[in-house]
Image (cartoon, rainbow, N blue to C red):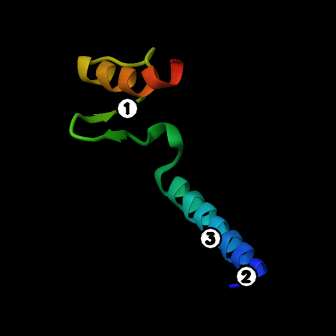
Amino acid sequence: MTRKQVVTALAIAVLGSLILWMIYLKAVGAIGVIPFRLGVVGQAASIDPALVESSAEKIMASAIYEPLVR
């Protein structure tokens, strides 16, 4: 493949991903209502540590945010 073909293929892939993302968001309503699925632990309504309610959500939120603040 030439460089132009690679760039064109990447552009098509990115545009396709964006279109699928927009369709998905339209179907669910908004990003804020999508539960975050976090492996074996379960799911959380929010990953914002200020909004967590249960101890499992606190563990998930800290696992997500801890590497970001180091």
Task: Single out the mark in the foreground, 2 or 1.
Answer: 2
Could you tell me if residue 52 is visible in this image?
yes
Task: Find numbered disc 2 in the image and state the secondary structure of the residue it sits on.
Answer: helix
Q: Is residue 31 left or right of residue 4?
A: left
Q: Is residue 66 left or right of residue 22?
A: left
**Labels in figure, total:** 3
**Separation (CA) of disc 3 from disc 1:** 30 Å
Disc on res. 69: none
Q: Which residue is mark 1?
A: 45
Q: Nearer the viewer, residue 57 or 59?
A: 59
* Residue type at tag 3: Ala
Q: If you read the primary sequence from the N terminus, does the residue marked by circle 3 or circle 1 appear first?
A: 3
Against 17, residue 7 (above or below) is below
Q: Position of residue 53 (x, y in %)?
A: 32, 17
**Separation (CA) of disc 2 from disc 3:** 12 Å
Q: Which residue is mark 2?
A: 5
Q: Position of residue 33 (x, y in %)?
A: 45, 39
